Image (tube, helix red, strand yellow):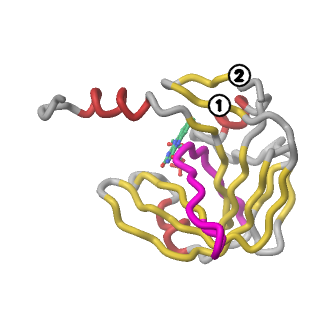
């Protein structure tokens, strides 16, 4: 075991854990906001809870901290372009993206494998990130194959 690991070694070790990719969305006033998130985790069935982690350096940190609702959109195998789009600085990430507003006021991305419409249940301060825990109030899901992410690359999953 290495006790004197640096940031790069930590990132590499974390990257050995494969994940899916999501876009987490909410609204700032009337403006839809969203960003790419692979730190999504299911937490609890009763009550239905999930979480994601957001970098405190994120441009939209205040929006997510103050919002009382957000949605998680699990990206499909052909959504690598959406994953890149929502991780890139641009005027409007939603331009040209097919989406609709949820009952709670969160953008839901069309063609997502799963969509979770959540109220914010708790926010935990954790180092350079916030852990945002959501209570799922509505969901939709289908059997489309998801987009995978592993060691910094997208992964073709053959479900
Ligand atoms: C595959 C992938 C997964 C990511 N996962 C996360 C994550 O879990 N948490 C996070 O804060 N940023 C994550 N990012 C980085 C953000 O999406 C990226 O920094 C984005 O530009 C932040 O947007 P904002 O600063 O406009 O809020 C991820 C990026 C990619 C490409």
Which residue is found at the position 60% from the left and 44% from the top? Answer: 36
Q: Does residue 102 belong to the magenta stretch?
A: no
Which class describes the residues within 10 Å of circle 2: few (<14), some (14-19), or many (20+)?
A: few
Residue 88 rendering spot, x and y as whole percentages = 58, 37
Residue 37 rendering spot, x and y as whole percentages = 57, 46
The region drawn magenta spans 31-49
- SS for dot 1: strand
The residue labelled by disc 2 is 156
Q: Could you tell me which quadrant the C terminus lies in?
A: top right
Task: Give the spatial CA distance, label 2 vs label 1.
Answer: 6 Å
* Foreground residue among 18 and 131: 18
Which residue is found at the position 66% from the left and 48% from the top? Answer: 23
Q: Does residue 34 belong to the magenta stretch?
A: yes
Q: Quadrant of residue 131?
A: bottom left
Do residues under tags 2 and 1 come within 8 Å of each other at their CB atoms? yes
- Vertically, is 91 above or below 12? below
- Vertically, is 55 above or below 146? below
- Which comes before the other along the chain, label 2 or label 1? 1
Q: Could you tell me which quadrant the N terminus lies in?
A: top left
The residue labelled by disc 1 is 148
* Foreground residue among 69 and 94: 69
Residue 42 rendering spot, x and y as whole percentages = 60, 57
Q: Quadrant of residue 27?
A: bottom right
């Amino acid at each position: 075991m290495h006790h004197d690991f640096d940031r790069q070694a930590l990132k590499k070790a974390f990257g050995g854990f494969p994940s899916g990719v999501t876009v987490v969305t909410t609204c700032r006033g009337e403006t839809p906001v969203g960003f790419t998130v692979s730190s999504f985790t299911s937490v609890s069935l009763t009550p239905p809870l999930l979480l994601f982690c957001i970098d405190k350096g994120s441009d939209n940190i205040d929006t997510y901290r103050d919002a009382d609702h957000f949605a998680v959109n699990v990206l499909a195998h052909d959504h690598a372009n959406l994953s890149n789009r929502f991780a890139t600085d641009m005027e409007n990430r939603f331009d040209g993206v097919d989406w609709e507003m949820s009952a709670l006021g969160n953008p839901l991305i069309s063609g997502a494998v799963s969509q979770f419409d959540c109220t914010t249940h708790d926010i935990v301060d954790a180092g350079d990130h916030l852990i945002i825990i959501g209570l799922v109030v509505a969901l939709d899901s289908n059997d489309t194959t998801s987009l995978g992410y592993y060691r910094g690359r997208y992964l073709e999953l053959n479900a």
